[in-house]
Image (spheres, grey):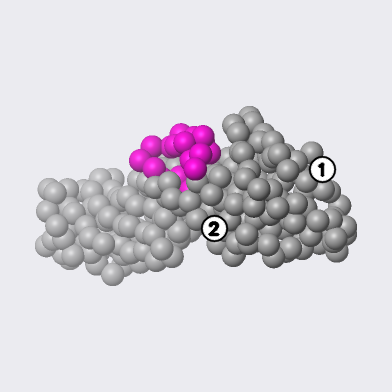
Amino acid sequence: MEFILDDEQKKLAKRASLLAKSYKPKRPEINLRFQVEQGGGLEPDWNGSACNIDTELGEKDIDYDQFYDLIFEFVEDNMDAFFEPFNQQDDDDSWGSIWCEFNYETKTLNFGHDVSYYESSFSVEEGKVKEDLAQRLINVKNDSEDLQGNVISMSFDGGGDSGSIEGGENELGESIDIPASFEDFGYNILEKNFGGWENNEGGNGNVLLNFTEPGEVHWAIEMNMIGEEGFSGTYDFEVKLDF
């Protein structure tokens, strides 16, 4: 991949190099980072466009936006190559960042990527309700005309740091009003088995209460969970600058 600089751009590269050297960095490198949005949009770093160097006293912003913009435009002009790792996920659901190390001694640009995406998974947890609580649930069921059949299903949906049990069905597939005691049990068993189901992208599914066995109540949770996954890597090319 070529990056041919015109005279003005060569001056920018030289000035950035001299400015970085003046801070006596640990390595002859200027670090830059760009954000990749879901759907493939390229944006400046969310913390503000900056060129950083590593010094003995920590990270230092050399505050040279013109050089940052120069490299940003190069990445944007070659987006097909730079976005390839982000396109590995379906439906343009990935996001993350592209980073660059400008070595001003070798006059090369090296690039890498940090890619994030959501991964869904399905699981089932099962158990038996303790005897005293089971009898209370049985009593509530027997006193209700809506709770017909042996299996009661409660649907739930979470996300954005909130979640709720949203409705229920009896064994006949009829919509029912969920009694408070059933709903409380649903929230408690969700928290014990899938703590955090309501956070971030959250989870959704059903809590099932099975009254088939006389005097007993068995429960099951059918959970669809969405979690954030990711990977990092470097690109298999470096770019030489002529200045």
Report crowding for label 1: few under 14, some 14 to 19, many 20 or more residues within 10 A (C-alpha). few
Q: Which mark is residue 118?
A: none
In this view, the residue farthest toward the bottom is 180
Is 54 placed left or right of 119 in the picture?
right
In this view, the residue farthest toward the front is 7
Q: Element type at marker 2?
A: strand
- Asked if residue 53 lies in the magenta stretch, the reply is no
Foreground tag (1 vs 2): 1
Based on the displayed image, in which of its 4 quarters is residue 176 positioned? Answer: bottom left
Is 96 placed left or right of 184 in the picture?
right
Based on the displayed image, in which of its 4 quarters is residue 47 positioned? Answer: bottom right
**Amino acid type, label 1:** Glu
Residue 53 x/y as whole percent: 77, 56
Give the residue pinned by disc 2. 44
Query: The C terminus appears in which quarter of the rendering?
Result: top right
Alpha carbon distance from label 1 to label 2: 25 Å
| Residue 128 visible in the picture | no
> 34 and 142: which one is in front?
34
Q: Main secondary structure of the magenta part?
A: helix
Q: Does residue 108 sit above or below 198 in this rendering?
A: above
**Which residue: 43% across, 50% down?**
41
Span of residues in magenta: 77-95
- Asked if residue 82 lies in the magenta stretch, the reply is yes
Give the residue pinned by disc 1. 105
Q: Does residue 77 sit above or below 30 in this rendering?
A: above
